[in-house]
Every structure is written in structure tokens, then in C-alpha cells.
Amino acid sequence: MMTLQDPAGATVLLESLWTIDQVAAYLKIPVHTLRTWRKRGTGPTAARIGKHLRYDPRQVRRWVEQRTAEAADD
């Protein structure tokens, strides 16, 4: 994690963006599955930074929470 100062002088913690390998490890799935989900638009949102895909860990966790909530409703 990184820390920055916001304009008001408060310290803000920033979590680094995750690589596709880190997301695959977090979800315990193959990287190929993440790539397939991205093509279908069904997986967690990724941003292209140059030639690299990066994931916001908060969005990945939110995506997992939504999926588990949907599964609980079934």
C-alpha cells in the first residue's frame, strides 16, 4: 500500500492495482478464465494501462460480493 497526502493534508492509503496473475490467484482460477470473462464482459472490470491489464482490488472484491449475493438469492 502507498500513502499520499490529500489537499486537506490528511493521509490517504492507496492499494496498488492488481495484475491479471494476481486476480487469478485471488480468485483461484486460471488466467485464461479471466481473459474469457473479459471478452464476454462477465468478469471483474479491468483497465488497460499501456499494454497491461490492471484491476482495482476494491472492484474485484465488490464483484465477488455481488456474485456471492446473487448465489445466495438463488
Image (cartoon, grey):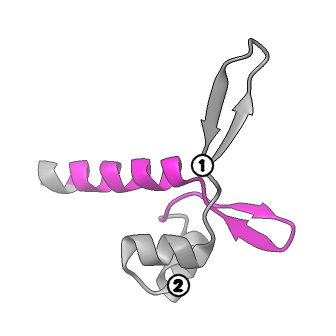
Give me the residue at 40% from left, 82% from top. Answer: 29
The answer to whether 63 appears left or right of 3 in the picture is left
Which span is picked out in magenta?
Answer: 43-70
Q: Could you say where residue 31 lies in the image, as x and y percent from the top left?
A: 52, 84
Looking at this view, name the residue that lies furthest to the right.
50
The quarter in which the C terminus is drawn is bottom left
Magenta region includes residue 39: no
Q: Could you say where residue 54 lies in the image, as x and y percent from the top left?
A: 68, 64
Task: Return the residue nearer the eye: 27 or 8.
Answer: 8
Q: How many marks?
A: 2
The answer to whether 4 appears left or right of 65 in the picture is right
C-alpha span from label 1 to label 2: 21 Å
The answer to whether 42 appears left or right of 55 in the picture is left
Q: In the figure, residue 35 lies in which quadrant? A: bottom right
Give me the residue at 51% from left, 77% from top. Answer: 34
Labelled pair 1, 2 in contact (Cβ < 8 Å): no
Name which residue type carries label 1: Glu
Name which residue type carries label 2: Val
- Label 1: how many residues lie within 10 Å, few (<14), some (14-19) or many (20+)? few
- Which callout, 1 or 2, points to the residue nearer the camera? 1
Q: Secondary structure at mark 2?
A: helix
Which residue position holds label 2? 31
Which residue position holds label 1? 15
Give me the residue at 77% from left, 64% from top. Answer: 48
